[in-house]
Image (cartoon, rainbow, N blue to C red):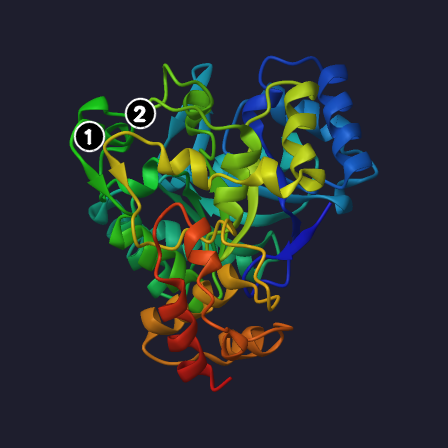
């Protein structure tokens, strides 16, 4: 298992995480089997958006004497009422819900206190200027949460949230289909087949800039909906009408700037093993480029997807990383120290490019890679 630091939090998370959906309607023994597999394979991050007491108490039993091995990302404003999940902004219910959460999980702290499901500007404004924000600060000062996070499907709302400097972790829906769609306060529009009937061209600019902004500010991203609720794995259900594999979806998400961990919605041990197999997958298995290029009515032409399809470079240049660092500089209008240092750590730099053009012949998106190498050399000085 490979690990990444979650933004500037100092928290180390596994590239593959676990979403709580897979624990639903499972016996305590079944939950224990999944946790045992996670321990054995090094999966250390669990997202707990669901307030289902059966899930929480089953996890508490499975995590007994090994709580410290895991990073728990659990959601504020997500409560259990009348036998079902409810999102709330009622501060009284939020507070009692958090206390119940700690008790059911049998822990005295949560690593990431995630403000749950914020997709509209009015909702975000109400949170930032009301008692929920004050309560998160209280929990932070008391050590009951280690950092404050926020979950969203709306890139414009998410950008405003991270710009405050308050949000240290963003949980966001990332996959090759959603990344084509513009911001909308109605999350259901991401699934709307009408949205995919017209010709779509490249990644939505707000989503691209959100990932780059998170990288700039040191806000770590944990990914939800990497498989689009499973739809992207089935050509008949996928909005693009082309199926991807779990490994391709995971690799796509992990190659976006600032992403640290992908929460797998594995519903059983075998599906969790399939997600974990990403860690030993070949480059061919990870390659999503050719599949994306085959999407009907969708064009990624001229846009570097960081897929690595251009490799190998005869001079050993990591072309995808050079392109990513250059794009981060362009987005920020300056050369951040972290980006500069990451670039300098590359074994081979853009200045070594001999303009042979072999990489451009391999690129399924017709990216002008030689031009990128020239710009990078001028930008970084080597």
- Residue 98 rendering spot, x and y as whole percentages: 52, 39
1 or 2: tag closer to the N-terminus: 1
- Residue 59 rendering spot, x and y as whole percentages: 69, 28
How busy is the neighbourhood of tag 2: few (under 14 within 10 Å), some, or many (20 plus)? many
Q: Secondary structure at mark 1?
A: helix
How busy is the neighbourhood of tag 1: few (under 14 within 10 Å), some, or many (20 plus)? some
The residue lying at 57 percent from left, 73 percent from top is 342
Name the side, left or right, on which 276 lies relative to 150. right
Q: Secondary structure at mark 2?
A: loop
The residue lying at 46 percent from left, 54 percent from top is 306
Q: Which residue is mark 2?
A: 239
Residue 327 visible, this orientation: yes
Residue 195, labelled with which disc? 1
**Do the CB atoms of the residues marked 1 and 2 lie less than 8 Å apart?**
yes
Compare residues 159 and 352 and report the one nearer the observer: 352
Q: How many labels, in total? A: 2
- Residue 254 rendering spot, x and y as whole percentages: 53, 48
Compare residues 9 and 287 and report the one nearer the observer: 287
Q: Write down the quadrant of residue 69 in the picture.
A: top right
Compare residues 137 and 10 and report the one nearer the observer: 10
Name the side, left or right, on which 208 lies relative to 7. left
- Residue 285 rendering spot, x and y as whole percentages: 60, 35
Name the side, left or right, on which 183 lies relative to 135. left
Is 291 located above or below residue 215 in the figure?
above
């Amino acid at each position: 298992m490979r690990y990444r630091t979650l933004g500037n939090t100092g928290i180390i998370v596994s590239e593959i995480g676990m979403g709580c959906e897979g624990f639903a309607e499972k016996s305590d023994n079944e939950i224990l089997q999944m946790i045992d597999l996670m321990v054995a394979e090094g999966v250390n991050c669990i997202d707990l958006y669901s307030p289902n007491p059966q899930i929480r108490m089953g996890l508490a039993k499975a995590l007994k004497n090994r709580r410290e091995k895991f990073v728990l990302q659990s959601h504020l404003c997500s409560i259990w009422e009348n036998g079902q999940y409810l999102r709330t902004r009622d501060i009284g219910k939020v507070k009692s819900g958090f206390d119940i959460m700690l008790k059911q999980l049998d822990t005295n702290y949560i690593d990431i206190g995630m403000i749950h499901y914020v997709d509209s500007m009015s909702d975000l404004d109400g949170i930032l200027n009301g008692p929920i924000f004050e309560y998160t600060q209280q929990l932070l000062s008391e050590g009951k949460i280690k950092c404050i996070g926020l979950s969203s499907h709306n890139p414009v709302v998410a950008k405003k949230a991270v710009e405050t400097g308050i949000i240290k972790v963003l949980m966001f829906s990332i996959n090759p289909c959603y990344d084509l769609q513009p911001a909308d306060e109605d999350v259901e529009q991401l699934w709307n087949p009408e949205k995919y009937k017209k010709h779509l061209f490249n990644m939505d600019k707000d989503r691209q800039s959100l990932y780059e902004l998170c990288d700039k500010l040191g806000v770590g991203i944990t990914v939800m909906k990497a498989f689009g609720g499973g739809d992207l794995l089935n050509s008949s259900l996928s909005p693009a009408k082309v199926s991807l594999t779990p490994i391709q979806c995971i690799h796509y998400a992990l190659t976006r700037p600032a992403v640290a961990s992908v929460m797998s919605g594995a519903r059983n041990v075998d599906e969790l093993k399939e997600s974990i197999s990403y860690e030993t997958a070949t480059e061919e298995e990870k390659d999503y480029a050719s599949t994306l290029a085959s999407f009907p009515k969708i064009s990624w032409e001229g846009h570097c997807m960081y897929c690595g399809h251009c490799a190998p470079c005869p001079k050993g240049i990591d072309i995808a990383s050079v392109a990513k660092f250059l794009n981060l500089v362009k987005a920020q209008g300056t050369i951040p120290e972290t980006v500069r240092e990451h670039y300098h750590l590359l074994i081979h730099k853009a200045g070594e490019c001999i303009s042979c053009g072999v990489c451009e012949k391999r690129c399924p998106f017709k990216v002008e890679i030689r031009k990128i190498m020239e710009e990078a050399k001028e930008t970084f000085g080597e």
